[in-house]
Amino acid sequence: DVIQGEVDQLVETAESRGLELKFEKSKDFPELLLDETKIRQVIMNFIDNAIYYTPSGGHIKVSLEDKGKTIEYRVTDDGMGVPKAEQHHLFNKFYRAGNAKKARPDGTGLGLFMAKKVIVASGGSIIFKSQEGKGSTFGFSFSKDKILVPDDYEEPEPLNGIKVGPGASTE
């Protein structure tokens, strides 16, 4: 499970910063048909941000829920939150909220921009809500009919050894 793997990788980092990081998932969760590498980057970005912008003693909850018609992934923290006046800029390229710049001056402002690009290009939508001083929720949602692995799905055969071009043969 991609999400469990990312959470397991970041638990030590969270604990070293005095944070509790936990993962909750609906039982009997269906297999999803998504680009694992790209989704892994989005998941890592959301959890990583929660770790950096939540003060020691804070809590981070990662959840994956089957909501009936949709699948939702969320990272909720009780960190610094995003000022209301800056929220509409948050997913813009190179944009960083003022309080985020102070807390972590080395950020690029590309993580959330890229996350949104990946999710929207994959047919999903971004989940975001925040209250300054109280925390944030970042996540994404996909309609089940777009991402569930069909019962008759077969993994395609690899293309290794196939020659392309005039006179090509597979012998």
Image (cartoon, helix red, strand yellow):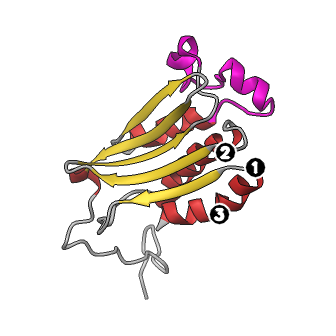
Cβ–Cβ under 8 Å for marks 1 and 2: yes
Q: Residues within 10 Å of mark 3 (few under 14, many from 20)?
A: few
Q: Quadrant of residue 27?
A: bottom left
Q: What residue is disc 3 on? A: 9
Q: Secondary structure at mark 3?
A: helix
Q: Residue at x 42, y 83 (%)?
A: 170
In the figure, is residue 146 to the left or right of 45?
A: left
Q: Is residue 107 magenta?
A: yes
Q: Amino acid at mark 1?
A: Arg
Q: Is residue 74 above or below residue 94?
A: below
Q: Residue at x 28, y 75 (%)?
A: 154
Q: What residue is disc 2 on? A: 51
Q: Is residue 29 above or below residue 65?
A: below
In the figure, is residue 80 to the left or right of 117?
A: right
Query: Which of these two is toward me, 140 or 15?
Result: 15
Earlier residue among tags 2 and 3: 3
Image coordinates for residue 86, horizontal then vertical, percent: 57, 15
